Image (cartoon, grey):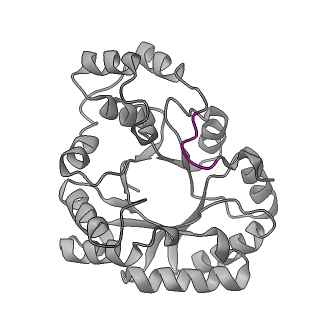
Amino acid sequence: MPCLGFGTFMLDSGGEARSSVLCALAAGYRLIDTASMYGNEREVGEAVRESGIPREDVFLTTKLWNTDHGYERATVAFEESLRKLDLGYIDLYLVHWPVEGLRMDSWSVMESLLAGGRCRAIGVSNYMVGHLEELMESSDVVPAVNQFQLNPYCFQEEVLDFCLAHGIVVQAYCPLARAERLDDPGLSEIASRYGKTPAQVLIRWSVQHGAVPVPKSSNRERIVENADVFDFSISTGDMDTLDSLDEDLHVGWDPRGVL
């Protein structure tokens, strides 16, 4: 799995998703993240094919949406995603949210898809420690990935530590907190010391915490900028300072209330 991904949430199907993914692939990204709920799987697949990059060199993730939980619905939803993407196979299929009541039935479908070779890996998204413990107590298949909000302002350290301790790869979505704190003076001061932008520091922070950040943008310059995070390291002291910025800032729905 590549160590940096490109997200496509809110990139519409009117051409924005296709052009942004093409730009990301040209800039060196090789992990592309989409979801059935995003409504752009078809355009993402078109961009991957149009890029000319061999299919095996692109790691493609999509997700099972909340209304498709349960054995029958989840099976149909996977086939629909596979058809829209039209890339032959899916590298990583995630349960998008821990929907109460049916998530274990859906996980059974994921296990079957994995065993049948329909996707290369399965995982979850927005699962907290309790959700992960429930799954792992009921299944012998440990999620390959847990994708959740992770940035210094939403430092879900308990979930991060649990995943890393159990060999679950962490993918960090909203690594830039949807730009809500890019003007933070403390963050700007740290960025200036490294000759980097605040966004690059936030992405690098995720990398140094052992996560795979999945930033998204439709701006060509920012897409390129966000990938330029592997030529510097943040010092231990500055990492500690960034860790201390945590304010439990969930810029999307908070899954902690799901039993």
| Residue for point 26% across, 61% down | 20
Question: How far across and how far down the image is residue 6, in percent?
Answer: 35, 55
| Residue for point 41% across, 83% down | 84
Residue 88's place in the image compared with 47, above or below, is: below
Magenta residues, dominant SS class? loop
Q: Is residue 257 left or right of residue 44?
A: right
Question: How far across and how far down the image is residue 35, in percent?
Answer: 48, 67
Question: How far across and how far down the image is residue 83, in percent?
Answer: 44, 86
In this view, the residue in front, 197 or 109, is 197
Span of residues in magenta: 249-253
- The number of discs equals 0
Question: How far across and how far down the image is residue 169, in percent?
Answer: 53, 49
Quadrant location of residue 141?
Answer: bottom right
Q: Residue furthest top?
A: 237
Query: Can the viewer see residue 4?
Result: yes
Q: Is residue 8 left or right of residue 118?
A: left
